[in-house]
Image (cartoon, helix red, strand yellow):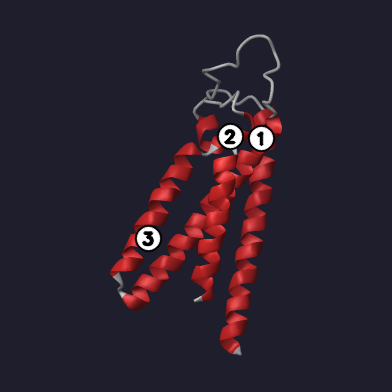
Amino acid sequence: MEKQMNKRLKFGLIIVILVAVAIFAAFWAVVLRQQHIPGFQQRRVPPTGGFIPGDFEYFYVAFTIISTINIALLVILTLIYLNIYIKTKSNFTIGLIIFALAFLVENLTSSPLVTSLYGFRAYGLGPFEFLPGLFEFFALTILLYLSIKY
């Protein structure tokens, strides 16, 4: 009974952390889109002519939120896998840690929050900007569920 309560507490804490990360990412994405930061000017500008069909700002805000949640999920998964490795000393767990760290580096380097700090901005991609991150979110959520369950 106590072990079940501990799992529920862990799961609830992870959900609270992910919601807080999502709110933080949404706020940060909106602020960065509306604010001009000196020293971090855009190096590329969208093509002249104004509106790019299929390119909505909401896609990029959604990608920022999804990307930041994925980073939080990967940090949580890495910590869980490290804890499992400490307990079991399994070679398979080392592979999971490397897997999680590789995805973490990929997500950090492609995060709109990081790329916008260096003056880069994606445009013209429409929904194809956030769909890979969304699929990754579902996969990471399943991994997290399975990692907590066992």
Residue 87 or residue 24, whichever sits in front:
87
Residue at 38% from the left image edge and 49% from the top image edge: 102
Disc 1 vs disc 3: Cβ atoms closer than 8 Å?
Answer: no
Q: Are marks 2 and 1 in contact (CB under 8 Å)?
A: yes
Within 10 angstroms of label 3, few (less than 14), some, or many (20 or more) residues? many
Q: Where is residue 79 shown, x and y percent of the image?
A: 45, 64
Instruction: Mark 3 vs mark 2: give the one in front.
Output: 2
Query: Is disc 1 placed on a helix, strand or loop?
Result: helix
Residue on which disc 1 sits:
59
Q: Position of residue 26 (x, y in %)?
A: 68, 43
Quadrant containing the N terminus in the rendered view = bottom right
Depth order, front residue of 64/36:
64
For the point 51% across and 36% down, the residue is 114
* Circle 2: residue type: Glu
Helix, strand or loop for disc 3: helix
The residue to which callout 3 is attached is 97
- Classed neighbour count for the residue bearing mark 1: other residues with Cα under 10 Å, few (<14), some (14–19), many (≥20): some
Q: Amino acid at mark 1?
A: Phe
Say which element carries label 2.
Answer: helix
Gap between marks 3 and 2 measured at Cα? 27 Å
From the image, tell me which residue sits under label 2.
Answer: 129
**Residue 37 has which mark?**
none
Rendered view: 128 above or below 75: above
